[in-house]
Image (cartoon, rainbow, N blue to C red):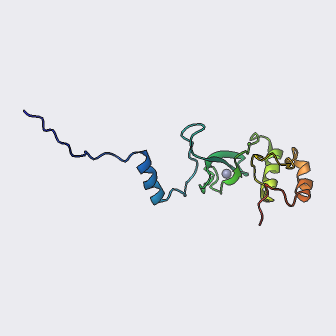
């Protein structure tokens, strides 16, 4: 029995880069539910998304349109420096929700500008929102 040696390229499964291209073409923006990150500190830009009703947050890729796996509502884009309060901390979640609804997002102050820090307590939120109409982390409508 002879072993046939051939130098034709053997079909290979797509490599990582090619898979990315395929996924891009197929469109991976629609992410249903919670997709856990492959590993901590991976190359993808994962950003906190949260569901205020369920008081949960997940790290998702920035462009994903995610829904909450618990209630099916939209998981809101929070920003990269968002830290979720404890699930039991209803007041802190309410504070975060009010800030979010007013357009505030959770970013890191990278340019060491003087930026008014977000309020620590729920009772301070209303005043904070009124006092900071042009806050740099506030989305304009
Ligand atoms: Zn939910």
Residue at x-position 45% and y-position 59%: 25
Q: Position of residue 1 (x, y in %)?
A: 7, 32
Q: Position of residue 20 (x, y in %)?
A: 46, 51
Q: Position of residue 46 (x, y in %)?
A: 62, 46
Residue at x-position 39% and y-position 45%: 15
| Left or right placement of residue 71 versus residue 125 in this view | left
Q: Nearer the viewer, residue 39 or 10?
A: 10
| Left or right placement of residue 122 versus residue 15 in this view | right
Residue at x-position 68% and y-position 54%: 77
Q: Nearer the viewer, residue 87 or 123?
A: 123
Q: Classify 84 as above or below 77.
A: above
- The residue lying furthest to the bottom in this view is 141
- The residue lying furthest to the top in this view is 1
Q: Classify 87 as above or below 31.
A: above
Q: Nearer the viewer, residue 29 or 87?
A: 29
Residue 31: image quadrant is bottom right
Indicate the quadrant containing the C terminus: top left, top right, bottom left or bottom right.
bottom right
């Amino acid at each position: 029995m002879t072993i046939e040696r051939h130098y034709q390229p053997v079909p290979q499964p797509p490599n990582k880069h090619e898979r990315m291209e395929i996924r891009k073409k197929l469109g991976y923006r629609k992410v249903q539910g919670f997709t856990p990150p492959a590993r901590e500190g991976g190359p993808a830009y994962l950003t906190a998304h949260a569901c205020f009703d369920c008081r949960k947050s997940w790290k998702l890729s920035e462009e994903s349109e995610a829904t909450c796996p618990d209630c099916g509502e939209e998981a809101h884009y929070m920003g990269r420096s968002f830290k979720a309060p404890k699930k039991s901390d209803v007041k802190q979640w309410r504070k975060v929700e009010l800030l979010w609804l007013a357009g505030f997002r959770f970013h890191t102050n990278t340019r060491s500008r003087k930026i008014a820090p977000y309020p620590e307590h729920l009772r301070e939120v209303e005043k904070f929102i009124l006092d900071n109409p042009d806050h740099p982390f506030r989305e304009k409508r």
